[in-house]
Image (spheres, helix red, strand yellow):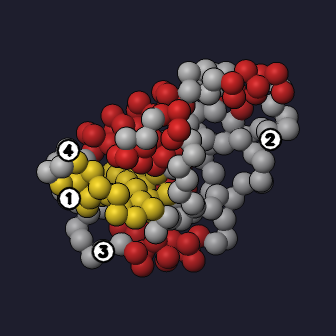
Amino acid sequence: MDIFLIRHTTPAVTYGTCYGFADLDLASTFAEEAGRVQGILPDKNFTVYASPLQRCSKLAAFLFGQTFRTDERLKEVNFGDWEMKTWDDIAVTTAKTWMADYLHEPVPNGESYTQLYNRSIAAFKELTASGKDTALVTHGGVIRSVLAYATGTPIEQSYDLRVEYGRAVHLHLNGNGLDVKGVNL
């Protein structure tokens, strides 16, 4: 079974803005980035799920037509009260408290990294349980979580795993578990 974790293309947002659940549109580079992703996907009949946020659903539609379902659990981390504020506008003391224990400390009216990780892994397990080739069009935090799960990387080290905008991770599920076939494809 092949699984592709596809990160949305570059969002249309000012650099330094905190966003997660915000439903951002995409930058003018969408067609170029989406075409690159399209070029790495094998010609297979994928079962496709996407985050309902437009930066993912637009890419899913471009890549797979309308043959995909959305799943709320594939959304990026919920930055709660910090959504769409610049990092400079977020109180330094509040940000420092969160950064000191982002694994367990939720953002005010948002969620912690552990909460994102747990919902991402639960979604991944459920959505890939069919054994059919699957593509998940989602966000960096979700992909980072699943990649950590697949590689046995401890959650406290998983934040260092990176997948660029408009790139994919290729996983292969076999009798021995998950193999990583490629990152940032």
Q: Tag 4 or tag 2, which sits nearer the N-term?
A: 2
Give left or right: position of 100 versus 48.
right
Residue 96 in the image, given as x and y percentages of width and height? 76, 25
Give left or right: position of 83 versus 8.
right
Residue 68 in the image, given as x and y percentages of width and height? 33, 57
Query: Residue at the location (20% across, 44% down)?
Result: 129
Compute the Cα span from label 1 to label 2.
41 Å
Which circle, 2 or 3, is nearer the viewer?
Answer: 3
For disc 2, the neighbor class at 10 Å (few under 14, some 14 to 19, many from 20) is some
Q: Tag 4 or tag 1, which sits nearer the N-term?
A: 1
Can the viewer see residue 148?
Answer: yes
Residue 70 in the image, given as x and y percentages of width and height? 38, 48
According to the image, label 2 marks what residue? 86
Compute the Cα span from label 2 to label 4.
39 Å
According to the image, label 4 marks what residue? 129
Can the viewer see residue 58?
Answer: no
According to the image, label 3 marks what residue? 42
Q: Quadrant of the N terminus?
A: bottom left
According to the image, label 1 marks what residue? 1
Q: Tag 2 or tag 1, which sits nearer the N-term?
A: 1
Q: Amino acid at mark 1?
A: Met
Q: In this picture, is 38 found above or below 49?
A: below
Q: Tag 3 or tag 2, which sits nearer the N-term?
A: 3
